Structure formats: structure tokens, C-alpha cells
Amino acid sequence: MKPIVIKNSKIPKALSFFIDIYAITLFPFIIIKDEGNDITINHEKIHIEQQKELWVVGFYLLYVYYWLKGKFKKQSNGDAYMNIPFEREAYTKQYDFKYLDKREKNAWKNYLSSRSS
């Protein structure tokens, strides 16, 4: 299934409670604040794959868990976000436009150890 990309949406701004959200993936939608770019769309496509692997709900539960884990370690909202393994994989591979062709299932698990706390 190909993701549905929604551009120029007000949804990212409306969901920006803890950090400024530029784009968000709510399976099967990629929702972007403006026109977006290929890098952002590739980043969000990685999230689509992660969500499919975890049957969507599992992804969101683990996403919140990892963010809260960072907050309990007294990380800022931004640092807690950047330490979520799903984000670490997506940011690391967002410039590799062939990544999804070769990505191993559950590759996000390779990013479980946090960056500096």
C-alpha cells in the first residue's frame, strides 16, 4: 500500500503540544505542514513501514513509551523525541532513498540504545 500524502495541512501545527511538528504519519497518511520535500517524505515512509510491522497500534504505544522513558530520564522534549528508536532510524536513513528497498524487518530495533542522555 502506498502512503497518502497530504500537504499544506493544519494538523501538524494543531498537534504541536510538546515539540513543533513539521510532518506526522498517521497510517496510512503522511501529513505535512507545507509542500514538504523528498527527504521529509522518505523519513515519514520509514515510519509507515515501522507502523505496519507493529500493526499500527503497537507502534503508537511504543512511541509514547520511549518518549516517556526519555522524560523520566529528565530529557528535554526534543531530546526525548530524538531518542525514540523509530525517530533515530528515520533520521539516520532519511537521505537514503533506496533504504526502504533493502530495509530489514524491525530494523528500528537496531536503534534501541539511547544517544547521550
Image (cartoon, grey):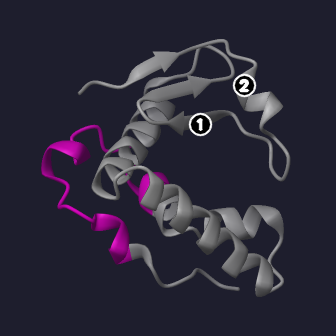
- Label 1: which secondary element: strand
- Residue 9 in the image, given as x and y percentages of width and height: 68, 16
Alpha carbon separation for disc pair 2 and 1: 9 Å
Residue under label 1? 24
- Residue 19 in the image, given as x and y percentages of width and height: 80, 50
Identity of the residue furthest to the left in this view: 102
- Label 2: which secondary element: helix
Quarter where residue 101 is shown = top left
Judge left or right: residue 2 versus residue 89.
left
Residue type indicated by callout 1: Ile
Q: Nearer the viewer, residue 39 or 59?
A: 59
- Identify the residue at horizontal 31%, vertical 44% (top origin): 96
The question of residue 96 being in magenta is answered with: yes
- For the question of whether residue 94 can be seen, the reply is no
Magenta region: 89-110
Quarter where residue 81 is shown = bottom right
- Residue 23 in the image, given as x and y percentages of width and height: 62, 33
Quadrant of image for the C terminus: bottom right
Q: Residues within 10 Å of mark 1 (few under 14, many from 20)?
A: some
Asked whether disc 2 touches disc 1, contact meaning CB atoms under 8 Å apart, the reply is yes
Quadrant of image for the N terminus: top left
The question of residue 81 being in magenta is answered with: no
Location of residue 19 with respect to 92 vertically, above or below: above
- Residue 39 in the image, given as x and y percentages of width and height: 46, 34
Residue under label 2? 11
Label at residue 14:
none
- For the question of whether residue 66 can be seen, the reply is yes
- Identify the residue at horizontal 71%, vertical 70% (top origin): 80
Q: Earlier in the sequence, mark 2 or mark 1?
A: 2
